Image (spheres, rainbow, N blue to C red):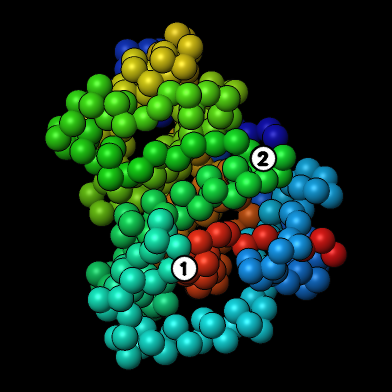
Amino acid sequence: MNVGKEVIPSKSSELNLGRNTNDVIEISSEDTSIDTNQLDQVESSSSESDNETTLKDQGSWCEQDVKAYLLSRFTSKEHKRLDKWQKKCERNELNGKMIGRDVEFKLMGNELAPLFMVPQDDETREEYYINDSVVNVFFELLKKRSDEFPNAYINHYSFSSHLVTQLIEGLKSEHEVLAWFKVEKLRGVHKMFLPLCISSHWVLLYVDIKEKIFSWLDPDPSSQILSYHFEKPVKVLQCFKSFLLPKLGYSDANEWPFVVRNNIPKQKNSVDCAVFVMKYGDCLTHGECFPFKQEDMVHFRRRIFLDIYRERLHRKNKD
């Protein structure tokens, strides 16, 4: 994939932690339009089925495959279940209830309720926002799926935003944070994901181990997180470069470039950043393309609810 590169000016260069600013790169947007005819032939499989297979069984994940997976239609059974939960949400019957089939992934109903709310125009009401519990569980489900189908999805590891928040706020040191992880679990992974909520805005820090690149995915280019809160991502990067990656044998981690990704879908409102970040991670477990847009957020919100309710991500059956 040919992409343009542009050096980021001003304070964001400090993210390089003392390195040449030429290693701080911005990847420009490119046309990600694809043929959507095959979407009409795709229907989501029920995650309760025992005979599910993945697109990877039929070949590599191309952009059309990923888009077909992301926008696969709900089955009639899924529609009925979503309608039932939607009505419960409208009657405020989700509050105070634990929702989910597995204790490990259960969440409170009020945490999942925003997934049924559709922001109008540029509304910024708090009830539309998705909290860190939902985001972290979704990334755990991504890992669960890749563990179950190691030949179908990219081997990766996701760090909890809870623990990193403690690092950023100074509640825990780098050594205390790293003590929570077993280095053995990180060996051999291709990608590392770290969803971050900074100043009520979600972004994704993504480490490509094979390519030796740190990437910053911000669904709102106007957020200026790197300009006004640059010390926070710097602290996280320092933890990766000076502590975690060297433990995995990457003594050159301090030389890896920091890249701001611009060839990604952008949010057009003020409340869907968490959904974008979750779907960035989802796409990255398939490859490096992001074939979705703002108009897909309502579908994604409902899909994420079903995924968490069933404690496993949906997959596509062989045609």
- Relative vertical location of residue 309 with respect to residue 286 in this rendering, above or below: below
Looking at the rendered structure, the secondary structure element under dot 2 is loop
User: Which dot, 1 or 2, sits closer to the camera?
Assistant: 1
Q: Residue at x 54, y 83 (%)?
A: 81
Q: Which mark is residue 101?
A: 1
* Element assignment for label 1: loop
Residue 163, image quadrant: top left
Task: Using the image, determine if residue 29 lies above or below residue 88.
Answer: above
Residue 183 x %, y %: 43, 23
Residue at 25 percent across and 69 percent down: it is 126
- Name the residue type under label 1: Arg
> Residue 151 placed where, x, y %?
72, 40
- Residues 152 and 62: in front is 152
Where residue 281 sits in the image (x, y, percent)? 52, 47
* 13 with respect to 96 (left or right): right
Query: Dividing the picture into quarters, in which one does residue 194 lie?
Result: top left
Q: Is residue 293 left or right of residue 35?
A: left
Q: Is residue 114 visible?
A: no
Quarter location, residue 103: bottom left
Q: Which mark is residue 5?
A: none
Front residue of 215/55: it is 55
Q: Mark 1 and mark 2: span between their CA atoms?
A: 24 Å
Q: Residues within 10 Å of mark 1 (few under 14, many from 20)?
A: few
Of the numbered discs in the image, which one, if any, rests on residue 150? 2
Residue 31 image offset from top left, x and y in percent: 66, 49
Left or right of 123 in this view: 58? right
Image quadrant where one finds the C terminus: bottom right
The amino acid beneath tag 2 is Pro
Most extreme residue toward the top, as rendered?
251
Q: Residues within 10 Å of mark 2 (few under 14, many from 20)?
A: few
Of the numbered discs 1 and 2, the one sitting upstream in the chain is: 1
